[in-house]
Image (tube, rainbow, N blue to C red):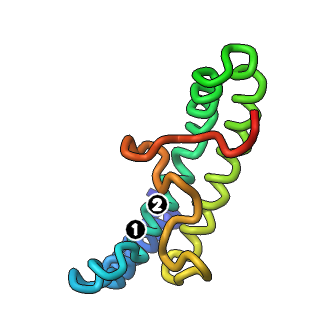
Amino acid sequence: MTQRARRIGVALIALAVVAAAWEPSAAAATQRPFGPVRKLGRGLANVALGVLEVPFRIGVVYEDHGVGAAAFWGSLAGIQAAVARIVVGAVEVVTFPLPLPRVGYGPIVEPEFLLNPKEPVETTGSV
């Protein structure tokens, strides 16, 4: 293991310890369901899984409009949504200890997690 890899590993562990210590208490969690640790996890998930927006959007457009629209508009909508989700995820990772204006620690994009079966994935524009 190189010296640089070891430093990165130590920094990530230190970041996780700080994030865990920053999580609100159980009483505060009932009043404010989102905290910095959830924001960090959501950001990492969005950066890692954001590319899955492309096949999801193709599938949504296919169900609504058919094969032709899915091939063109679904792909474009998926690429746009993937880029947006990855950028938002990166912003959430970088700013996880700080609440953002208007949303606080809440999600910037909906659904909060792409692979959440409770929340439907919808197209955001007219197709």
> Which of 6/41 is in front?
41
SS for dot 1: helix
| Residue 10 sits above or below residue 124 on the image | below
Residue 29 x %, y % = 29, 79
| Residue 109: quadrant of the picture | bottom right
Task: Identify the residue shown where x is 40% and y is 68%.
Answer: 38
Q: Quadrant of the N terminus?
A: bottom left
> Which of 121/81 is in front?
121
Mark 1 and mark 2 in contact (Cβ < 8 Å)? Answer: yes
SS for dot 2: helix
Q: Is residue 8 left or right of residue 68?
A: left
| Residue 74 sits above or below residue 25 on the image | above
Residue 2 x %, y % = 49, 60
Task: Identify the residue shown where x is 53% and y is 82%.
Answer: 99
Task: Identify the residue shown where x is 53% and y is 41%.
Answer: 121
Residue highlighted by disc 1 = 38
Q: Quadrant of the C terminus?
A: top right
Task: Identify the residue shown where x is 51% and y is 75%.
Answer: 96
Q: Which mark is residue 116?
A: none
| Residue 71 sits above or below residue 91 on the image | above
Q: In the rendered picture of this protein, how many numbered marks are placed on residues?
A: 2
Q: Amino acid at mark 1?
A: Arg
Residue at the outermost left position: 26
Give me the C-alpha separation between circle 2 and circle 1.
6 Å
| Residue 58: quadrant of the picture | top right
Q: Is residue 73 left or right of residue 60?
A: right
Q: Amino acid at mark 2?
A: Arg
Are there few (<14), some (14-19), or many (20+) residues within 10 Å of tag 2? many
Residue highlighted by disc 2 = 42
Q: Is residue 79 left or right of residue 16?
A: right
> Which of 100/14 is in front?
100
Residue at the outermost top position: 67
